[in-house]
Image (cartoon, rainbow, N blue to C red):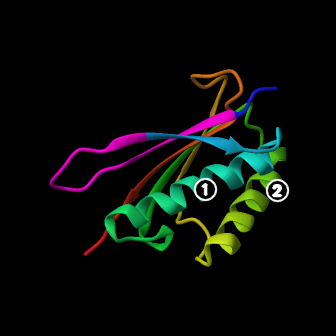
Amino acid sequence: MTATEAYERVRRRSGGGRPRWDRGIGGSNHTCRVERSCLTVGTAPAAVGASFDDVVKPTVYVVDWAPAKTPLFLEGVARASAALGSTPMAPGTLIGVAALDVPDHLVEVEAAAVID
């Protein structure tokens, strides 16, 4: 299996965002992918003076989602939160999808953060 890439975009109110692909995702299960995606999104706000705690609206797309995968999802979020030293992910939307843009992708996280 090739390295999976995660996409993130940080946008300031006054400027455009820039995409970043993180090729360092390890593990092939949903827990590892959720953790890595949250870590990637959790570090992005630092570029504009914010943190993962400033994320107010995450939208998470998960391939082949089923309620039985909830413990895997929550474990990934908990690991990322512990690594970032932040509170768990803000309430958001979780959407089950058949596939993402690249076959190896299992999880994609979009996040909106509010900073002063």
Q: Is mark 1 on a helix, strand or loop?
A: helix
Q: Report the residue at 60% width, 26% height from top.
A: 100
Cβ–Cβ under 8 Å for marks 2 and 1: no
Q: Is residue 16 magenta?
A: yes
Q: Report the residue at 30% width, 45% height from top.
A: 17
Quarter of the image containing the N terminus?
A: top right
Magenta residues, as a range? 4-19
Q: Report the residue at 72% width, 33% height from top.
A: 3
Query: Dot 1, how many residues are within 10 Å of its Cα: few (below 14), some (14-19), or many (20+)?
Result: many
Q: Report the residue at 52% width, 66% height from top.
A: 90
- Left or right of 65? Residue 57 is left
For badge 2, the amino acid type reads Pro
Quarter of the image containing the C terminus?
A: bottom left
Q: Name the residue under label 1.
A: 38
**Occupied quadrant, residue 9:** top left
Q: Name the residue under label 2.
A: 71
Expressed as whole percent of the image width and height from the top left, the position of residue 93 reads 53, 49
Expressed as whole percent of the image width and height from the top left, the position of residue 57 reads 44, 57
User: Is 42 situated above or below 7?
Assistant: below
User: Is 74 situated above or below 37?
Assistant: below
Tell me the CA gap for discs 2 and 1: 16 Å
Which badge, 2 or 1, comes first in the chain's sequence? Answer: 1
